[in-house]
Image: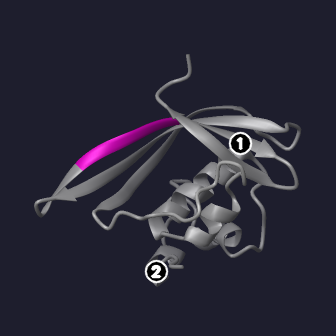
Amino acid sequence: MTGPTPSERRDGCPCGSGRPYNGCCGPFHAGAREPATAEQLMRARYAAYVSRHEAFLLVTWYPQTRPARIQFDPDLRWTGLDILATSEGSAFHRQGTVEFIASYETRRRGRWTPGQLHEVSQFLMSDRWVYVDGAVGRRP
């Protein structure tokens, strides 16, 4: 398991909230707090992908759709997250969706090329919010 670097802990959280990592997604990754909304979990999962925090990703994945492990691509780096829309996903709901665009760069033949992942993610609340799955592209 890897985690954020010392500068990431002091600087802005990778999730794009504008807050320091230790005051944002850090407590979720450390198990000190649980995300209260589907959007908080989405942001924390994105930050976990940035820092390659496999344990957090697996524990916040719905058991029926969770992979055995996560294969991180060494030639991919995440560069930004934009939340486009949310539906339900609060403390008063049992499910929620988060539509987002996650920007990235891939290295091919020594050059970094930008790209984007546009997804609508589904979340469920049981004893905690968990990621179920996602559909690429906008909602119909």
* SS for dot 2: loop
Viewer can see residue 25: no
The span shown in magenta is: 114-119
Identity of the residue drawn at 34% across and 61% down: 77
Instruction: Name above or below for residue 129 compared with residue 107.
Output: above
Q: Residue furthest top?
A: 140
Identity of the residue drawn at 77% across and 51% down: 129
Of the pair 13 and 116, the residue shown nearer to us: 116
Circle 1: residue type: Phe
Left or right: 2 as drawn, with respect to 80: right
Q: Which disc, if any, is residue 123?
A: 1
Q: Mark 2 sits on what residue?
A: 5
Q: Residue furthest left?
A: 109
On the image, the x and y values in percent for residue 35 come to 75, 57
Work out how far the residue at label 1 is from the one at label 2, CA to CA, in angstroms. 28 Å
Look at the image and say whether residue 39 sits in the magenta stretch: no
Identity of the residue drawn at 85% across and 37% down: 93
Left or right: 94 as drawn, with respect to 51: right
Left or right: 57 as drawn, with respect to 106: right
On the image, the x and y values in percent for residue 64 come to 71, 49
